[in-house]
Each structure stands twice: as structure tokens, then as C-alpha cells.
Amino acid sequence: MSGELFLAIDVGTGSVRAALIDVTGKILELASREHDQIVPEFGWAEQRPVDWWEGARASVKTVLDRVDGAREHISAICVCGQMHGLVLLDAHGALTRDTAPLWNDKRTIDLVRRFEEANEPDSYLPESGNTPTPAWPGFKLQWARDNDPAAYASSAVAIMPKDYINYRLTGEIAMDTGDASCSFLMNPERLDWSPVMIERMGLDAARLPPIRNPLDILGQVTEQAARDTGLRSGTPVLVGGADYPVALLGSGACRPGMGSDSTGTGAIITVIAEKPLLDPEISNVATIEGNWAQFVLLETGGDGMRWARRAFHDNALSYDEIVARAAEAPAGCDALLFMPFLTGERLGRHRNARAQFFGLGAAHGMEHLHRSILEGIAFAMTRHIRIMEQASNKPLERVIAAGGGARAELWLKIKASAFNIPILVPREPECGIVGCAAMAATATGRFSRVEQAAKRFVSYGAEILPDPRWAETYRRTQPVFDKLYYHSQALYDDIDALAAATRPTQP
């Protein structure tokens, strides 16, 4: 093996992956180790940080074994990871809780509700940059304080999943601006912990780690980590980043005016801007290059198709067959609308939102139902794009697609026409790995700015243009969708009460 290499480690919800990348951004080898979610109670989701480390150790060893001499040619290591998972360590670096609550853990919902009842948005948005949600680690820290006081009292620092891997590699502890910005505890203007939020939530600032630039060198691989992984001791390790902003970089969405559509189980629509958007319906995360990603996560993205496959076809049809049926219906589905809230909304006062079909008539068939699901998700995403465009007074130029939704051409065309914006599809779908490589290349001096690395490493295949006829239909339909969105909110509490009243009692 000759030539400089970068090593990327991605701590995901389903697996840890390691990849070797060359200086052109090409992925040479990739290996993964799966791990499980633990669900001790309804609405909870946990994982064991030691499983992340075992996954990192095993996957790194695998890629090193596949490329002769690779360990000697790795110039830098960059780790990215799932966001919002709370890891507590004591003063000696030992876990004070064996498990870490994850991004999708809902155990803090009552803490969030109490916070919202006691605080108006104007009082916390400027200090936190975000609106409350059970995902944020600040609420998880409150939960640990109240429900696991021994673990909280013995903890010296609270970190995120990728920070734990960095600690096991280097013995050093820090948090990047991206993970910190979504803690509900960082001031977005100063990029530092907010004394106001820490005091308001009754937490201890001493448990929060230093916030550092994701491109900084955090430390070097220790002798112990080298023995565990097969890496060369002394190899530089970056501070790294949260997986979402790293993937934005690795898709090329790294300057104001660009957007991203990341559709997997959920759907995240993002607009890159110079500043966060302080709006109760919008979330904000600091990006790798120093901008802000304004985003909204719809809990129902690809999950809408998964639901239709189960509910309408008992899983007998493939997703491709469902999309093919949807293609038989006209744009607008003959005035049939779908509200895509099968599992509610993440933000705002209507987390108990429900899904619904509206406008059903005798002439509608299965093809209309399927297409209306795809269109309904596109309309919900468009609504948030318009909120972000209006606040920034800057139109979105183009959107870059990622995730499983990037493989459904019909859905991409529907979205492009609803947004009335072209959608680009990266040739390399492993955007997180590419983002890590761009960061490592910049940190080691190959590029002066990380945007230059992204421009060099990222290329695109298809460009999906809006269909003019579809775009006109969707332009007329969007205001009706928006009205239905608002008018339905008055009924959600009634539906909850009705469901509770009709739920069978336990014997």
C-alpha cells in the first residue's frame, strides 16, 4: 500500500462502520459491526456505549486487515456519530450508566412539557437555538438527575456517542459545536455553554465538556487503543462531528442557499444559512464549515411507505411495486390529500398530530392513496421550506437528496415539483464517510477550507428537475394542505380523549 489514507468511523444507530478513504475521497474499504437497541419500557431506546467501542474496534481491524500496510499510511482519523445519546463518565473515564438513552428515546416527555408550560419561546430560543424536544441531551441530564441520582452524582462529564469513541481512542474529551448546538444548553451566538439554560434546567456546568471546532486535532491514538484496534499509536484524531452535519458536508450541502432532503424512516428537510432560525417549528444545528443547518424532521418519511405496504398489502408488495402503483395516479391525486403524521410531530404544541386522508371520493383507487402519501410528505416538507425561506429572505437554490428516498425517482420528481427546486443526487451515497474524509483532508492541510475538500470529493449523478405541469398543480394544492394542517389541530386532543375512552380496560 502506498499513498496517504484517512480513516472514518461512523457510530450509527444500527451499526458502527469504519472506512478507509484515499486522498481523492474514494472509499477503498468499508466494514461494519451491528448492535442492538434496548427497549426496557415503551418509548425508551438505549444502547451500550461499550458495544459502540467493540463495533469500532472490530470494524477498524477488519478494514486494516484488508489493505496491506494501511495502518502506516493513515494520516488522520475522523469519527462521526448519532446525535443526542447521553453518555455519563466518572472522573476516571468509567461509565456511570451502562446504557445511554438515544436520540429517539421519549422518556423525558414530561420534563419537556413542564419546561414548555413554564417558559415562553422568546425566553429560551436566543439562548438555546432550539425548541424543546425529548431528543435533546439537556432533558436527558435532567432525567438522570431525578431518576438515577447515583449515576448522576458520580458522573464527571456528559458526552455524545462519537465523543465516547474519541475518548477510547485518545483518552481526551471534548464535544464539537454540532452536537453541543443540539443539546438545548449551548448559546448559538457565542458557541459556548449557556449559563442561563444550565441554571434554568437545574443542571451543573461542571459536567459539560469543552466545546471545540470539529476540525481541531483532539489527540493521538494511545498505546492501549493501538493494541485494541491495530492502529498505529500516535495517529491524529479529530474532534469530529455529529453524523447529520458531517453527512451534509459529505453531500456537498455546505453553503448558504443550499438545501438537503434526507429521507429514511423519517424525512429531514434542511436549509443551510449563516445564522440559526429562532422559530418554534424549526431546529438548528451548527455545521462543520461554520454555518447553520435549519431543519425540520418529519417522523414519517419512508415510514409512510412502510405503513402502506403493511396496512394495504400485508407486506405482499415490494416498495418498487407500491411506487409503480403510485405512478398510475395523476399529480394532485384528483384532490386527495394525506397528512403525514402517523407518529405525530417532533416539535410544537401538537406532537399528538394524527395522519389522515382528506378528500376521498368513490373514484379514488389504491394508486391515489399511494401517491397521496408521497405527495403529502412532500407538501409537509414544502411548508417548512417556505417558513425558512421567508425568515431568511433568501430563496433555496437547490436541494441535495440523501438516504433511501434518493433511490425512488418518482418521489424525487414529486418533491422537486412541490419544492419547485431541482434536486441533485450524489454519486456516492455514503455521505457521512465522505464528510469525515473531507474533514480529515482539511485538518491535515490538503485544503485550506473544508468546503474546498467537499467540492473536490463530491460529485452528482442525476439532477431531477421540476415537472412544470406537476409544479403548477402542487402550487394550487399547497395552500389547501396548509389550511388542513392548521384546522386539524383543533381535533387532536379530542381524538386522544376518544382513543382513551374506547381503549379496552385491562382485566
Image (cartoon, helix red, strand yellow):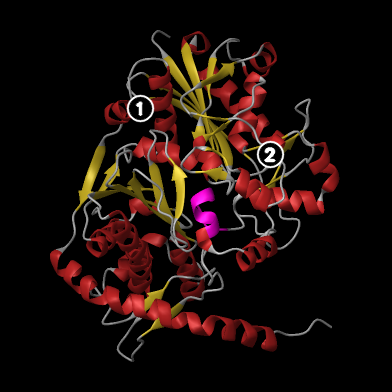
Q: Is residue 75 magenta?
A: no
Q: Tell me if residue 24 comes above or below residue 120 in the rendering.
A: above
Q: Is residue 107 left or right of residue 73?
A: right
**Percent position (x, y) of residue 280?**
47, 62
- Count neighbours of disc 2 (C-alpha within 10 A) and say few if under 14, some if 14 to 19, many if 20 or more: some
Amino acid at the residue labelled 2: Ala
Q: Tell me if residue 99 comes above or below residue 115 in the rendering.
A: above
Q: Is residue 126 visible?
A: yes
Q: Is residue 126 magenta?
A: yes
> Is there a contact, CB below 8 Å, between mark 2 and mark 1?
no
- Count neighbours of disc 1 (C-alpha within 10 A) and say few if under 14, some if 14 to 19, many if 20 or more: many
Q: CA distance from mark 2 to mark 1?
A: 31 Å
**Percent position (x, y) of residue 497?**
64, 85
Q: Is residue 78 left or right of residue 420?
A: right
Residue under pointer 1: 450
Residue found 75% across the figure and 60% down from its top = 41
Amino acid at the residue labelled 1: Val
* Quadrant, the C terminus: bottom right
Q: Is residue 55 visible?
A: no
Q: Marks 2 and 1: which is nearer the front?
A: 2
**Percent position (x, y) of residue 149?**
83, 47
Q: Is residue 413 left or right of residue 220?
A: left
* Magenta stretch in the rendered image: 123-132
Q: Which mark is residue 205?
A: 2
**Percent position (x, y) of residue 276?**
41, 48
